[in-house]
Amino acid sequence: MREEKYDISGMHCAACSASVERVTRKLPGVERSEVNLTTGIMTIRYDDSQLGPEQIIAKVEKAGFGAVPHPEKREKAAAVPKDDEAAALKRKKIELITAAVFSAVLLYVSMGQMLPFGLPALPLPDLFSMHTHPVNFAILQLLLTIPVLYCGRNFFISGFKALAHGNPNMDSLVAIGSACSFAYSVVMTFLISDDPHAYVHNLYYESAAVVLTLVSLGKFLESRNMQKTKGAITALMRLAPDTAILAESGREVPTDSLKTGDLVLVKPGQRVPADGVVTSGESSVNEAMLTGESLPVEKSPGSEVIGGSVNQNGVLYVKVTRTGEDTTLARIIRFVEDAQGKKAPISKTADKVAGVFVPVVMAIALLAAVAWAIAGQPFAFVLKVFTSVLVIACPCALGLATPTAIMVGTGLGARHGILIRSGEILEITHSVDTVVLDKTGTVTKGEPAVTAVLPCQCDETTLLKTAGAMESVSAHPLAQAITGYVKEKAITDISQPADFENLSGRGLKAVLDGKTALAGNRRLMEEQGVDVSPLLEQAEQLSAQGQTPMFFAMDGALLGLISVADPVKDTSADAIRAMKRQGIRTVLLTGDNRAAAEHIGALVGVDEVIAQVLPEEKAGVIQQLQEQGRKVMMVGDGINDAPALTQAEVGCAIGSGSDIAIESADIVLMRDDLQDVSRALRLSALTLRDIKQNLFWAFCYNTIGIPIAAGALYLFGGPLLSPMFAGAAMSLSSVCVVGNALRLGRAKL
C-alpha cells in the first residue's frame, strides 16, 4: 500500500471536499481518501499495483477540481504560502471594496425612495426617478449591478462549473440565487415601458448585488482568519535560516547545502542553521518557538542545539549532526502538518451531511418555490423564497467546524512544545482516565546525581576531596556523578591517586598522598577491615529508597559515605497533582525493585506503583489496565517503552527520549517536563469543546435558517426573509465558526 498527499485546488466548501473524497474512494485499490478543506490537502492510501498518480489526478480533474502532488520538502513548502496567499487576499480585498461601493450606491438608488415607517424618500435626480423615468431608474440599477457581478465572478465560474460536473457546492447555491434575481430583473427592465407601475416594483438587482457582496465579505474574513489558523506551520517554516557560515573558511553557504560533520559559526542574534553539538563557545539560546521553554537555555561545549533556535549573546561553534528532513525542526513541522491534515472521528458526521447538503438544499429551494407558486403567490414572491433558501444555506460552516479547531489546537500545542500526531489523537486524549508513567527519565532525571553527603571523623570538604580524587580515574556513571558534584562545590586542590586498582563489583583502591584510600560498597570496606557501623543504619535506609551509598576510607578509617541516585525531576510532583485535579489516575511503571519504586511513588504522589516489570512486559500491563475498562496514556522516553507507547490509546514521549520512543508516540513533549502531560490533556479538552461548539452552531444555524428562508414565519403572519439578509446570515455563520476556532488559540494551557 502507498500513501500520498495531493494539493487540491478549486474547493470552496465542505461539499467540494466531500465530492473529491467520494470520487477518489471509488477508484480501484483505494483504501482511504481524506480531504482537509482547511489545508486543501488530500491524503490517499491505495494499492499502487492497481492505481497510479496519473489516474488519481485525472479523476479529481474530471470532478471539476485541480490536483498536484503535495511538496514534501520543507523548503518548497515554505516558499509558497506567504506571497501567493497574501496576493490573493489583497485581490479579494480590492474586489470586495469595489463591490461594496457599487452595492451601497445601488441600495441608495433602489431602496431610497421606498423607506418604511413613513420616512421621507432619499433625494435622487429626477432623471432617475422611479415615478417619472422608470426605464432610466431600471437601467441605472443594471449598470451598477454589472461591476458587482464582475467582482463576484468566481462564484459563477466555480458554481456553474461544479454544477456541470454534477458536484454542486456552496458557490453553486449563491450563483443560482444571484443569477435568478439578476435575470428576472433584466426581463422586468425590458418590460417596464409596457406597464411602468407594475414592473418597476419587481426589480431585484439589489438582491443579486448585495448577496454577492455580503458573501464575498464573509469569504474575505474567512480567508483572512484561515491564514491565522495556519500561523503555527508558517512560523515554524520560517525559523530555519536561509544561510549558514562555515567556520573553517568563513564562507556563507545555503543551509540546504550543509552536511553532517560540517562546523558552522553562529554569531549572536543569528539562528542555528541545523541540529548540532557545540564544540566551543558559550552562550544562551532561545528555544521558545520549538520547545515552548520560555527562558533561554545555557549552552557550552558538548551541549546539543536545535536548528532554528536563536543564539543570544555569545559566539558558538557548532558541529552539524542532522540536516534536511532529519532535523528536529523538520520533524516538528511534519508532525504538525500530519496532525492538521488528518481528520478527527467527530468530523465524519459533518462530512456525511456536507456531502449531500447542497443537493438537498437545492431540492428544498425548488419545493418551497413550487409550493408557494401553487398557493397563488406572485412570481416575485416565489423568486425571493427560492433565492433566500439557496443563499442562506451554508455547508462551509459544517466543513470548517472541525479542521479549523484542529489546526488552531495543534498550533497552540506546538507553541507550547506539545506535538500531536493527528486530529484523532487530539480527540481521543480527552477520554484518557489513566496515565501510566515510566520512572527513569520520565519521572526521574534519568542520570545519577549525588543526593546525600555524610562525613564521619572528618569534615565534608575533606570527604569530597578524597571522593573527587578517587572517582576522577573512573568512567562509571556513579563516579561521574560524584566528580561532577565536587566541581559544582568549587573544590580544588585535588590530588592524583597512584597505584590505582579497580576491584570488580566492590569499588576502587589507590594510594592518595601516601595513604591507602578506598572507595566502594560495604563489602569492600568489610574485606579491608574498615568499620562502617557508624553509618550503617543511614546506608541501609538510603538503599531501601533505591539509592546507592558509597563508603570512603583512608588508612583503615571511615571518612564517610556519599549516596548517589536518579533524582526525581523538580516538576514531577506538581505534574502528578495537576493530573489528579483533572480526575486522572496515575500509575508508576518501572523495572526497578519494589522498595525503590514505592519510595519514588510516595515522593511524587502517584496512585499506584507497579514495579519489577521487564521491558517486554510493559505492554502487557497496559493491556491489563485496558481490559479493566481504562483509557490509558503511556508516558515514556526509552527504547523499552516503545511497545507500551504503541499499546496504549495514547502514547506520549518525552522529547529528551530515544528516537524509537518518539516515533512510537502519538504525542511528543519537546520539553523534558512532565507538567506538559496535563497541558496536553487540557488542550484536548479545549479543542474538543471548540469542535462541538462549532458543529452545534453550524447545524443549529442551518436547521433554523433554511425553514425561515422557505417562508415558515410568513405562514404564521411573520416577515418573509430577504435574500440580502440571508446572504449576511450565511457569511456570518462561517466567520463565527472560524472566529471561535481562533479564540482557542488564545487559551492558556
Image: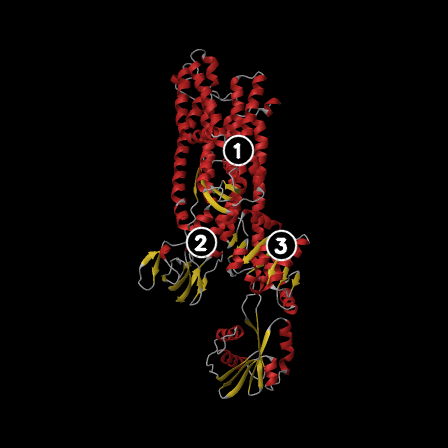
Q: Is 273 located above or below residue 407 in the figure?
A: below
Farthest residue toward the right?
628
Disc 3 crowd rating (10 Å Cα; few below 14, some 14-19, many 20+) is many
Q: Label for residue 298?
A: none
In the image, farthest residue toward the top: 194
Q: Nearer the viewer, residue 746 or 531?
A: 531
Q: Amino acid at mark 3?
A: Val
The image position of residue 466, as x and y in percent, is: 52, 81
Asked if labels 3 and 1 touch by Cβ distance under 8 angstroms, the answer is: no
Distance from label 2 to label 1 (Cα)?
A: 37 Å
Residue 538 percent across, percent down from the top left:
63, 77
Dot 1 crowding, Cα within 10 Å, few <14, some 14–19, many 20+: many
Q: Is residue 224 visible?
A: yes
Q: Secondary structure at mark 3?
A: strand
Question: Which marked residue is nearer to the observer: mark 1 or mark 3?
Answer: 3
Label 1: element kind = loop
Tell me which amino acid carries mark 2: Ala
In the image, 133: left or right of 670?
Answer: left
In this rendering, the label closer to the viewer, 2 or 1: 2
Identify the residue position indicated by label 2 in the image: 330
Look at 46% across and 38% down and name the residue there: 221
Picture quadrant where residue 252 is located: bottom left
The numbered mark, 1 or 3, whose residue comes first in the sequence reads 1
Q: Earlier in the sequence, mark 2 or mark 3?
A: 2
